[in-house]
Amino acid sequence: MLTRIDHIGIACFDLDKTVEFYRATYGFEVFHSEVNEEQGVREAMLKINDTGDGGASYLQLLEPTREDSTVAKWLAKNGEGVHHIAFGTADVDGVAADVRSKGVRVLYPEPRVGSMGSRITFLHPKDCGGVLTELVTAAKSDEEH
């Protein structure tokens, strides 16, 4: 079951400049930042609000760190803007299996590690109305360990 919009991924050429825009314009601050070597991106998560299921909603700003990354290729084709939408779930494996059984292509055979230690997988945009869709199970907080 999907429980929230976990984040909206926004591809950008200059992460620092884009973070400053969201800070100056909307007052959003960076909650978490990291470099994901596997995906070839530097990212910043801007927390928008907490949600009723213990999660939160974020904007995820993504800057490619290498030209062969998926985000770099997407930026070259589309320019800056919304890259994907991510839905939160307590069971990324179960939701992925469910949507796969309905004919939606799941891009990873098994979920991978995503931002902030989450477990993620993506759904093919051609099967989701042209929208790259991510499924996310947030990592457990320190209080839940």
Image (cartoon, grey):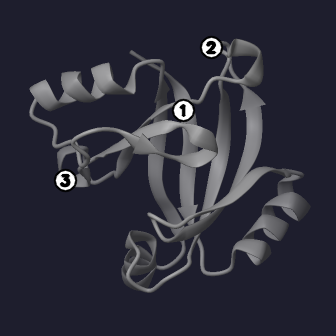
Label 1 Cα neighbours within 10 Å, binned few <14 / some 14-19 / many ≥20: some
> With 42 as the anchor, is 64 left or right in this view?
left
Relative to 36, is 90 above or below? Answer: above
In front: mark 1 or mark 2?
A: 2
In the rendered image, residue 69, in percent from the top left (x then y), is placed at: 41, 75
Which quarter of the image is occupied by the N terminus? top left
Identify the residue under disc 3: 126
Relative to 47, is 142 above or below? Answer: above
Label 2 Cα neighbours within 10 Å, binned few <14 / some 14-19 / many ≥20: few
Q: Residue drawn at (28%, 38%), measured in percent from left and top?
A: 110
Q: Earlier in the sequence, mark 3 or mark 1?
A: 1
Q: Secondary structure at mark 2?
A: loop
Numbered tag placed on residue 53 in the rendering? 2
The amino acid at mark 3 is Lys
The amino acid at mark 1 is Ile
Q: Residue drawn at (62%, 13%), measured in percent from left and top?
A: 53
> With 134 as the anchor, is 3 left or right in this view?
right
Q: Residue drawn at (34%, 52%), measured in percent from left and top?
A: 132
Identify the residue under disc 1: 5
Q: Nearer the viewer, residue 36 or 82?
A: 36
In the rendered image, residue 59, in percent from the top left (x then y), is placed at: 65, 49
Q: How many marks?
A: 3
Disc 1 and disc 2: Cα gap in Å? 11 Å
Q: Nearer the viewer, residue 108 or 20?
A: 108
Q: Secondary structure at mark 1?
A: strand
Relative to 37, is 126 above or below? Answer: above
Q: Residue 128 lies in what quarter of the image? A: top left
Q: Secondary structure at mark 3?
A: helix
Relative to 28, is 111 above or below? Answer: above
In the rendered image, residue 133, in percent from the top left (x then y), is placed at: 36, 45
Q: Nearer the viewer, residue 79 or 109?
A: 109
Disc 3 and disc 1: Cα gap in Å? 20 Å
